[in-house]
Amino acid sequence: MTTDALDAWLQVRSQIDWSSAAARIPGPVEPVVDGLAAWCGEGGRFSDLARGHRLLAALARSRMDASQRCPLTCTLLTGWQQLVLGRPEVQFRQGDAFAKGGRERYALTSHTERDFEQCLRDSADRRVPLASRAARAYLDVIFFHPFSDGNARLAMLTLAYVLESEGVRPDQVGPLQTTRYADDAAGAADLAALVFVLIRSTRQRAIRFRH
């Protein structure tokens, strides 16, 4: 049986100095172009237009939840996932999950959902820079793999929620979409740095555009 990638991620997660992985960016960042909405499709990203529309609805919900300061919980994510998948009922996975053609296995234990909830709560720890919290939450969803389908989309919505909680909207997210590995500590830290760069670049482009 393949090794437990979720356990590998939790070890990596605890070893990274998230406070140093990315710098802080003060205040809200309003883009000229809404990169997350563009990523959701609007008829361009997905050949299935209905899929893109569902994702846009889920993005709107995640942003509303962030603006209302709803705590990031598995229940909150379940509501988004219902919109993403277009299903009235969605539940936390009931067994081991697999990705990358079966090369990564995410084991299910009696405490997996509880551990996931704890990791989600970490996204509110403002002692850690926003870019690091957003990247870490994104990877938590990827490697906990909480649902049977749509976890990559949910990970991006989770990142959007964390950024929205401080009024930040990047003007592009395409660079975030690359294969991530649970045991890659350097890659996880690099993702936090990349989120920081995307936020900083968005602010710089917005300033140039408005002046």
Image (cartoon, grey):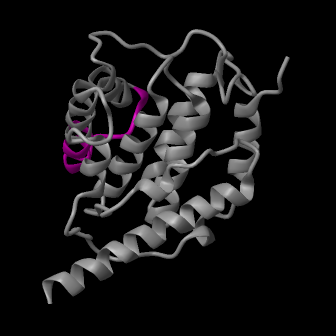
Magenta-colored stretch includes residue 137: no
The answer to whether one can see residue 128 in this image is: no
Please name the residue shown 38% across and 39% down the image.
Answer: 72
Residue 129's x, y, as percent?
48, 67
Residue 163's x, y, as percent?
35, 57
The answer to whether 36 appears left or right of 98 in the picture is left
Please name the residue shown 59% across and 31% down the image.
Answer: 144
Please name the residue shown 32% across and 34% down the image.
Answer: 46
Residue 20's x, y, as percent?
62, 72
The answer to whether one can see residue 196 in this image is: yes
Residue 18's x, y, as percent?
61, 62
In the image, residue 36 sits, relative to residue 87, either above or below, namely below
The answer to whether 110 appears left or right of 205 in the picture is right
* Quadrant of image for the N terminus: top right
Q: Magenta residues?
A: 61-74
In the image, residue 201 sits, relative to residue 44, either above or below, namely below
Please name the residue shown 83% across and 27% down the image.
Answer: 3
Hey, which quadrant is residue 182 in on the image?
top right
The answer to whether 30 appears left or right of 197 in the picture is left
In the image, residue 192 sits, relative to residue 147, either above or below, namely below
Hey, which quadrant is residue 27 in on the image?
bottom left
